[in-house]
Structure formats: C-alpha cells, structure tokens
Image (spheres, rainbow, N blue to C red):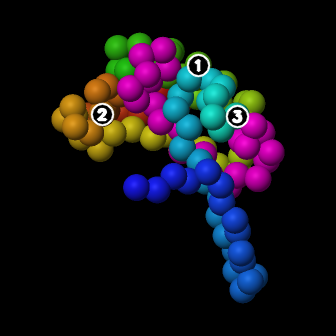
Amino acid sequence: NAVLDGIDFDIESGKKVYLSAAPQCPFPDHKLNGALHTGLFDYVWIQFYNNPSCEFDVSNPEKFKNSWRKWTSNIPAKKFFVGLPAAAAKSAAGSGFAEKETNMKEYE
C-alpha cells in the first residue's frame, strides 16, 4: 500500500508537460479547489456522475448545464472535458451514464 501526499516535477528535458485534474462535479471541489484556481491546469475533466446535484441526467438537462457553466466560468483552465462513465453497469458508475444515441448538442 502507498499514500500519495505530493508530487515533485523533475522536468529536465524541456519537453512540454500537461497538467490535468478530474474533480467531481459539485462546485467547488473541496480537495482540488485551491490548486484549480492557480491557472496552471491544461485540462480539467469534470466527473459528471455519481453526484445527483450536478451529474449528467437526460431527464434534467438544466442541472448539468448549470454545473458546466459554473465550472467553466470560475476555473481558469485551458480546456474542459465532460467526464461520463463508459458503461451503464453499476460497476462503472452508479449514475450519470449517457446512451450512445444521446445528442449532446441538446446539453450545450
């Protein structure tokens, strides 16, 4: 067993390194909020599942849209992505799955 309590970047080659985070959708994320507000993140993959107050739900698109707007207007990241489970099975996630036929344009 191991515990991760910090990260040390030792980048000696000058190669581009990307920094990403995957917070849960309730805003603000209590563990990542400070780090996300630094403006250092290239990608933020918001987990829009397993959180009824903000998760993706085809029957309530406004809930998802409001959460998306909150994240994208308050966190200074270069790109945001919608994180959804890849399967409807409970082993993938308890809720927040979108069928492949779902037209995501309706949720913009």
Q: Residue at x 31, y 25 (%)?
A: 95
Sequence-wise first label, 2 or 1? 1
Per the image, label 3 sits on a secondary structure element best described as: helix
Q: Position of residue 46 (x, y in %)?
A: 53, 38
Q: Residue at x 29, y 27 (%)?
A: 94
Per the image, label 2 sits on a secondary structure element best described as: loop
Q: Position of residue 24 (x, y in %)?
A: 52, 32
Sequence-wise first label, 1 or 3? 3
Question: From the image, which quarter does the N terminus lie in?
Answer: bottom left
| Secondary structure predominantly adopted by residues drawn in magenta | loop
Q: Amino acid at mark 1?
A: Asn
Q: Amino acid at mark 2?
A: Ala
Determine which residue is flagged by label 1.
66
Determine which residue is flagged by label 2.
93
Determine which residue is flagged by label 3.
33
Mark 1 Cα within 10 Å, few/some/many (few <14, many 20+)? few
Q: Is residue 46 visible?
A: yes
Mark 1 vs mark 3, CA separation in Å: 18 Å
Q: Is residue 101 visible?
A: no
Q: Pick the residue in front: 29 or 105.
A: 29
- Where are the magenta residues, as a range? 34-56
- Is 53 covered by the magenta stretch? yes
Q: Residue at x 30, y 33 (%)?
A: 93
Q: Quadrant of residue 10?
A: bottom right
Sequence-wise first label, 3 or 2? 3
Position of 7 relative to 102 (above/below):
below
